[in-house]
Amino acid sequence: MIIAVDGPTASGKGTIAKALAAHFGLPHLDTGLLYRAVGRQVQLGGGDPNDPAAALAACDFADALLDDDALRSEEAGGFASRVSVHPAVRRALYERQRAFALQPGGAVLDGRDIGTVIAPDADVKLFVTASVQERARRRWLEMTGREIDIPLAEIEQDIVRRDARDINRADAPLRAAPDALVIDTTSFGREQAIEAVIEAVRTRLGTA
């Protein structure tokens, strides 16, 4: 069974994907972490994330980089959004994601193009979203909880910019698959959102 979970930054898709993986006993891949690693590799090399050649070269990052705490920073997220617009980068990471999705028994993957590009044949496709203001608030709470001092307004502006890049990129833009279940978590608490999504997935599988 393959479950695809897509959505914009800070929508709650990662939390939901992990919960679904635990509930159904499936391995989970945060595909955004791969793009963050590419962006981080560009940064470490002093390159320009807007340069397609530098971004492509960074796809050959060491696996150990995926454990770098810096990948969770707002800066790394911005770099990830910038390198992800390059078609060559998306092609380079496609096979890695596709192989994970097709492993025996299935998997849960979350990202921005899982249901539309990586696993269009997924058994269940979800598109998790929330208002810009709520997503910014969540990210701000996360950052302050890690003792990172950053203005809420700055986070909101960054989310708006990243949304625009992700939605308007020519290759694999952020959008809900036509057959995806769209779930707005703006008014949901963490546990409420998880319970609602698990029930929605169980219902979808039952009707399938």
Image: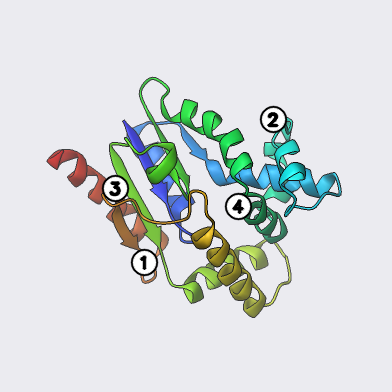
Question: x%, y% of residue 73?
Answer: 69, 56
SS under mark 2: helix
Q: Is residue 26 above or below residue 143?
A: above
Mark 2 → mark 3, Cα distance in angstroms: 31 Å
Q: Which residue is mark 3?
A: 198
Quick check: marks 2 and 4 in contact, CB under 8 Å? no
Question: x%, y% of residue 189?
Answer: 39, 65
Quadrant (top left/top right/bottom left/bottom right) for the C terminus: top left
Q: Amino acid at mark 4?
A: Val
Q: Earlier in the sequence, mark 2 or mark 4?
A: 2
Q: Amino acid at mark 3?
A: Ile
Q: Which residue is mark 4?
A: 85
Q: Residues within 10 Å of mark 1 (few under 14, many from 20)?
A: few
Q: Earlier in the sequence, mark 1 or mark 3?
A: 1
Q: Which circle, 4 or 3, is nearer the viewer?
A: 4
Residue ID at (67%, 38%): 66
The part of the image, by quadrant, that contains residue 45 is top right
Question: Taking the image as drawn, is residue 9 in sight?
Answer: no
Q: Amino acid at mark 2?
A: Asp
Mark 4 → mark 3, Cα distance in angstroms: 32 Å
Q: Earlier in the sequence, mark 2 or mark 3?
A: 2
Q: How many marks?
A: 4
